[in-house]
Amino acid sequence: MTDLPLAGFVAVSAVLLGIGLFGILTRRNFILLLIAIEVAMNSAILNFVVFGSYWNSISASSVEGQSVAVVLIGLAATEVAVGLAIVLALNRSRGSINVAEATTLRL
Amino acid sequence: MILELLAFLVLAATATLTALAALLVRELVHTILWVALFFVALSGFYFLVSAPFLGVLQLGVYAGAVTILLLFGVMVTRKRIFAREAATGLGPAPIALSLLVLVILATAATTVPSGTTQLSGFPIAALSTALFNVYGGWLLLLGLVMLPALAGSIYLVREDRE
Amino acid sequence: MTALPWTLFAPELFLLGAALLVFLLDSLGIRRLELFGGLATVGISIALLGVLADLRFAPLAGLATVPAGNVDVPWSPLNASLVVVTSFGLIFQAIFLTSALLVALASLSRRSDEKGAAIFFGLLLFATLGMTLAALAADLIYLLLAIEVTGISTYLLVGYTRRDARGLEAAMKFYIIGALSAALSFFGASLLYAYYGTTNLATLGTGFVSMFPSPLGGATGIAFLGYGFLLVGIGFKVTAVPFHAWAVDVYDGAPSDVSAFLAGGSKKVGLFAYFVVFLVPILASQTTFVCPGGPTPTCHYLHSTFGIPLQVLFGLLAVVTMTAGNVLALMQTEMKRMLAYSSISQAGYMLIGLAVATSPAIAGATLQIFAHVFMKTGAFLVVAAVAGFGIGSRIEEWKGVGLRHRWLGASFAAMLLSLAGIPLTVGFVSKFVLFSAAVQAQGWFVWLAVAGLLNSALSVFYYARVLRVMYMERPEVGSAPVPAGAVVGGSDPPALTLGGIGVGRATAIGLATAAVFAFGVYPQPVLAGLQMAADHLVQLL
């Protein structure tokens, strides 16, 4: 049982989401994009865990937040694997994974 | 109490700085190192808010498996392993947009009561019971996400035998 | 918690079974496109029949797997179940399955030695499974996860050609946007969870705080932000402007059959999510809730404070989406890109239903979604069929197509007329119902109907341009070159053909065309069903 500032956690997750969005908008390397998306996803998971504990301290049986977090961690790992599969296939067929070089399709 | 607050501050600083560093350093391999640290810092948060199971899961899945996957991706997709990320100018628009989101979220965060709040854990057994009972549907769906992901990913990266 | 019978999932189990069988046969070395396609078609057909039976569709009602007492049960926040059966959800299931059925039928006509048939049909079945499961959602996390089942399957489906860099690039773009959309949606969900302490859709947004006073005090800003993030996150799936840019590239780069599924089927799951997530807070601001079991100190509802702002947001989103979609469609020179922008503008019309949020408007929007399945899936399937004759995606290559390929041309003309909203087609009926519902609702909603009408008039220009090219212009002599290795299924036609295209594809296009006219001339039964479902939905929430 711990006493912590809730607002601090909300602030951290907000900053992490901001960093993630910043990365998604500015980076062009696919691996960095994956990492930026993971940072954003982790900010959501952090919120779920922290508020899961919060709600649990209010009503002793609320495990919902942390259950969501367990599922989301699995989901995010699956997403990374799929992203890497796509990028490996693309790398083999073309030899570069810079999204900016993916110019066959017009923007 | 003071110790916990201190731990929170240290972890918060580590998490944000490592996340930033991961996206800003120029060597892709260093990026992976920073990301691993970022995942570890988050797992520290989970231990701090009395969610040890999540902390262990975060260490195993993220700091372990996902980091290795990313490292693997870097190694396979780059002819020269230590190649640099193509420098992209930081346009004003993305920075402005990210800052905007940050400001909006920060304003919302200020509406949260600023005092400390009691956070408490629960037996891990309760978590697993809930996961397979009330929230069993989520786990089933996670399985349904993983199955096509597995089949499709294997198909995409498999070499043709011709 | 009411125990739902497992037979509730009978249609989904057929889809899952077919998908697993496809993968199993493939790993056993039995690789026949006809076999996989047949399995997929049969599985989807059975599932569709099951859903129609559950809707108490007269000739099939005896086969219903869900007891009538379990459909449209009032949706109590105190009931912690993850799934709920509503007629609204069942209708969406039928819509999803119809789209998947058309695509599966058409794909039967691929070259039978084509690589990746197993993965194509397997992923198609999984994507459909995710959509049908999403249509049962009573819980936000469940809904987002089910959408993710569809998402992961469709990213891989876009890139399934594997050697084709265009398809893989489209898959990569689709993946990045999809993962971003998932992260934003889950972040929104986490804020809603922080505020309400639950992810039950019926509870969210009503201000009902389960047993305990609001944890964050008066910080409703967090909840509103949560809805904002969900609006953006799901907006990517719906291709609402300004979150639409990916769709055109992906529809253009993906194999045409996959584009047909994306535009006709999988983006509708985003619209369904919009409805079930946002109708609660919107309606909560208009209704007075009665506490189940009478008012007690531990149960209190507050009026939702952000119903009206959400309606205004959706109204803006609808107008911007349809206008931008139509204006950009006017400027396209490629058929698939034109159809993609037209699809975006159609999403704008559908969003009117959410902004108005009365039961006739919801019914109208659902009819629009229903119509769009036939029009857009059919149109993309025709593009794929015409590509089989070596005619590419540039509109100028389509000169005289209507004269040379009469049946295909006539079908495509029917789809375009329906998209434009010409009478006697289902596109006209759906727009008529939707816009008149907006006018009925009065107030500023009338302007939504006006915007919709103006946009429909605007859209006639680009559809008519295509029709002119197809029917009035003669192809230059000696033109119509066959580009090398142009299209999947192009060079080596399947064994069974009908007028130069495969029987499966011809059947799918024929069905879609027939539906466009049948429901255009005689829409009453469908309309009555949709109206009933919308009435129920509004009362349930």
Image (cartoon, coloured by chain):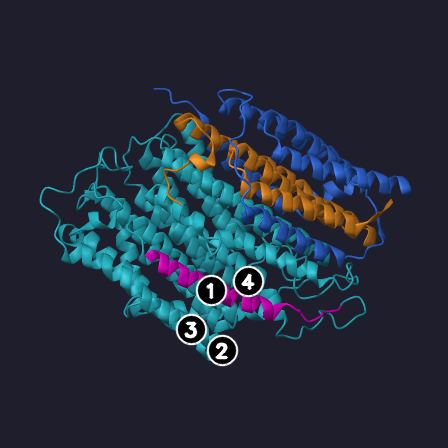
Chain colours: A orange, B blue, C cyan
Position of residue C84 relative to residue B126, above or below, is below
Q: Residues within 10 Å of mark 1 (few under 14, many from 20)?
A: many
Q: Nearer the viewer, mark 2 or mark 1?
A: 1
Residue C282 point in image, percent of width and height: 59, 68
Q: Is residue C366 visible?
A: no
Kindly identify which residue carries mark 4.
C71
Q: Are marks 3 and 4 in contact (CB under 8 Å)?
A: no
Image quarter in which the N terminus of chain B is found? top right
Mark 3 to mark 2 CA distance (whole Å): 10 Å
| Dot 1 amino acid type | Ala
x 62%, y 66%: residue:
C281
- Label located before the other in sequence (4 or 1): 4
* SS at mark 4 in the image: loop
Residue C226 spot, x, y in % from top left: 64, 56
Depth check: give the residue in front, A93 or C242. C242
Q: Which residues are magenta?
A: C300-329
Image quadrant for the C terminus of chain B?
top left
Circle 3 SS class: helix
What's the CA distance linking mark 3 and mark 4?
A: 33 Å
Against B61, residue C392 (above or below) is below
- Secondary structure predominantly adopted by residues drawn in magenta: helix
Residue A49, position in %: x, y?
73, 45
